[in-house]
Image: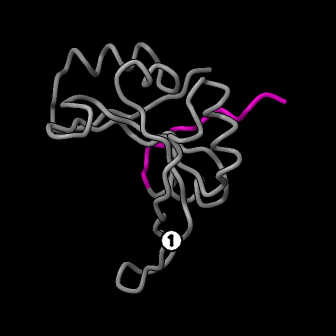
Amino acid sequence: MPPDIPRAFARRSDGFRHAAAGGLWLAPLVYLERARYGAGWYGKVVSADPERLLAWAISKGIPPRALQVKSLPDVDMPRAIRRRLPGYHIDLWGARLALAYDPELLARTRRRGSSSAPPLSAPIR
Protein backbone atom coordinates (compact mmCIF):
# COMPACT_ATOMS: atom_id res chain seq x y z
CA MET A 1 0.00 0.00 0.00
CA PRO A 2 1.50 3.38 -0.98
CA PRO A 3 2.05 5.98 1.75
CA ASP A 4 -0.50 8.71 2.32
CA ILE A 5 -0.30 12.03 0.51
CA PRO A 6 -0.07 15.06 2.81
CA ARG A 7 -3.13 17.32 2.56
CA ALA A 8 -3.16 21.10 2.57
CA PHE A 9 -5.94 23.10 4.19
CA ALA A 10 -6.99 26.72 3.73
CA ARG A 11 -7.34 27.10 7.52
CA ARG A 12 -4.51 26.14 9.87
CA SER A 13 -7.04 24.94 12.47
CA ASP A 14 -8.37 22.37 9.97
CA GLY A 15 -4.80 21.22 9.33
CA PHE A 16 -4.16 20.83 13.06
CA ARG A 17 -7.37 18.78 13.41
CA HIS A 18 -6.37 16.54 10.51
CA ALA A 19 -2.86 16.02 11.95
CA ALA A 20 -4.20 15.37 15.47
CA ALA A 21 -6.45 12.65 14.02
CA GLY A 22 -3.36 10.95 12.55
CA GLY A 23 -3.51 12.35 9.02
CA LEU A 24 -0.62 13.99 7.20
CA TRP A 25 -0.96 17.79 7.06
CA LEU A 26 1.06 19.84 4.61
CA ALA A 27 1.58 23.04 6.60
CA PRO A 28 1.67 26.40 4.77
CA LEU A 29 5.02 27.61 3.51
CA VAL A 30 6.77 30.28 5.57
CA TYR A 31 9.71 32.51 4.72
CA LEU A 32 12.37 32.55 7.42
CA GLU A 33 15.11 35.19 7.40
CA ARG A 34 17.10 33.40 10.09
CA ALA A 35 16.98 29.62 10.00
CA ARG A 36 19.36 26.73 10.54
CA TYR A 37 19.90 26.17 6.81
CA GLY A 38 19.80 29.82 5.76
CA ALA A 39 17.13 32.28 4.72
CA GLY A 40 14.40 30.90 2.47
CA TRP A 41 11.08 29.14 2.21
CA TYR A 42 10.36 26.33 4.67
CA GLY A 43 7.51 23.87 4.96
CA LYS A 44 6.66 20.80 6.98
CA VAL A 45 4.53 17.69 7.05
CA VAL A 46 2.80 17.25 10.41
CA SER A 47 1.00 14.32 12.08
CA ALA A 48 0.20 12.76 15.43
CA ASP A 49 1.04 9.36 13.90
CA PRO A 50 4.83 8.96 13.73
CA GLU A 51 4.69 5.66 11.82
CA ARG A 52 2.52 7.16 9.08
CA LEU A 53 4.79 10.21 8.87
CA LEU A 54 7.93 8.05 8.72
CA ALA A 55 6.41 5.84 6.00
CA TRP A 56 5.80 8.97 3.90
CA ALA A 57 9.31 10.30 4.58
CA ILE A 58 11.04 7.03 3.72
CA SER A 59 9.04 6.80 0.47
CA LYS A 60 10.52 10.21 -0.46
CA GLY A 61 14.08 9.28 0.51
CA ILE A 62 14.06 11.36 3.69
CA PRO A 63 15.98 9.62 6.48
CA PRO A 64 14.10 8.65 9.67
CA ARG A 65 16.34 10.98 11.70
CA ALA A 66 14.44 13.92 10.13
CA LEU A 67 11.43 13.12 12.34
CA GLN A 68 11.01 15.75 15.07
CA VAL A 69 8.73 15.80 18.09
CA LYS A 70 6.55 18.86 18.62
CA SER A 71 3.17 18.91 20.29
CA LEU A 72 0.04 20.10 18.51
CA PRO A 73 -2.52 22.50 19.96
CA ASP A 74 -5.97 21.08 20.63
CA VAL A 75 -7.77 23.72 18.56
CA ASP A 76 -11.17 22.53 19.77
CA MET A 77 -10.49 23.83 23.30
CA PRO A 78 -10.72 27.49 24.35
CA ARG A 79 -7.35 29.21 23.90
CA ALA A 80 -7.05 30.10 27.61
CA ILE A 81 -7.10 26.43 28.69
CA ARG A 82 -5.85 24.79 25.47
CA ARG A 83 -3.96 21.58 26.04
CA ARG A 84 -1.21 20.18 23.81
CA LEU A 85 -1.44 16.86 21.98
CA PRO A 86 1.41 14.56 20.92
CA GLY A 87 2.69 15.51 17.49
CA TYR A 88 5.55 15.06 15.04
CA HIS A 89 6.81 16.83 11.94
CA ILE A 90 9.41 16.70 9.22
CA ASP A 91 10.90 20.00 8.06
CA LEU A 92 11.27 20.63 4.35
CA TRP A 93 13.46 23.29 2.71
CA GLY A 94 15.38 23.79 -0.51
CA ALA A 95 15.07 20.85 -2.90
CA ARG A 96 13.08 18.87 -0.31
CA LEU A 97 10.12 21.24 -0.74
CA ALA A 98 9.44 19.63 -4.13
CA LEU A 99 8.86 16.28 -2.39
CA ALA A 100 5.54 17.51 -0.96
CA TYR A 101 4.59 20.88 -2.45
CA ASP A 102 3.27 21.51 -5.95
CA PRO A 103 6.13 22.66 -8.24
CA GLU A 104 4.00 25.46 -9.72
CA LEU A 105 3.20 26.75 -6.23
CA LEU A 106 6.91 26.71 -5.37
CA ALA A 107 7.80 28.63 -8.54
CA ARG A 108 5.12 31.28 -7.88
CA THR A 109 6.20 31.56 -4.25
CA ARG A 110 9.87 32.00 -5.11
CA ARG A 111 9.03 34.67 -7.71
CA ARG A 112 7.09 36.59 -5.05
CA GLY A 113 10.10 36.65 -2.73
CA SER A 114 9.67 37.04 1.02
CA SER A 115 6.24 38.67 0.90
CA SER A 116 4.46 38.76 4.24
CA ALA A 117 1.38 36.82 3.10
CA PRO A 118 2.09 33.08 3.08
CA PRO A 119 0.60 31.18 0.13
CA LEU A 120 -1.79 28.29 0.51
CA SER A 121 -0.05 24.98 -0.06
CA ALA A 122 -1.23 22.21 -2.31
CA PRO A 123 0.05 18.61 -2.35
CA ILE A 124 1.37 16.89 -5.43
CA ARG A 125 -1.14 14.41 -6.80
Coordinates of residue 98 in the picture (x, y in percent): 46, 19
Q: Secondary structure at mark 1?
A: loop
Measured from the top left, where is residue 92 in percent x and y? 42, 33
Tell me the kind of residue under disc 1.
Answer: Asp
- Compared across the picture, whether 98 is left or right of 51 comes to left
Location of the N terminus by quadrant is top right
Quick check: 94 above or below 47?
Answer: above
Q: Nearer the viewer, residue 125 or 10?
A: 125
Q: Position of residue 82 (x, y in %)?
A: 43, 79
Which of the two residues, 56 or 28, is positioned nearer the viewer here?
56
Magenta stretch encompasses residue 70: no
Quadrant for the C terminus, please. Answer: top right
Task: Confirm whether the magenta stretch covers residue 2.
Answer: yes
Residue range corresponding to the magenta coloring: 1-12
Residue extending farthest to the right is 1
Q: Residue at x 70, y 45 (%)?
A: 52
The residue sitting at the bottom extreme is: 81
Residue positioned 57% across, 38% down in the render: 7
Front-most of residues 2 and 14: 2
Q: For residue 39, what is the image quadrant?
A: top left
Q: Is residue 102 left or right of residue 86?
A: left
Tell how many labels: 1
Q: Is residue 81 above or below residue 18?
A: below
At a point 26% along the width and 32% down the height, the residue shown is 37
Display coloring: one colour
Q: In this image, 88 relative to 39: left or right? A: right
Q: Residues within 10 Å of mark 1 (few under 14, many from 20)?
A: some
Residue tagged 1:
74
- Left or right, 37 with respect to 10, comes to left
What is the chief secondary structure element of the magenta stretch?
loop
Quarter of the image holding residue 38? top left
Residue at the image position 67 percent from the left and 26 percent from the top = 59
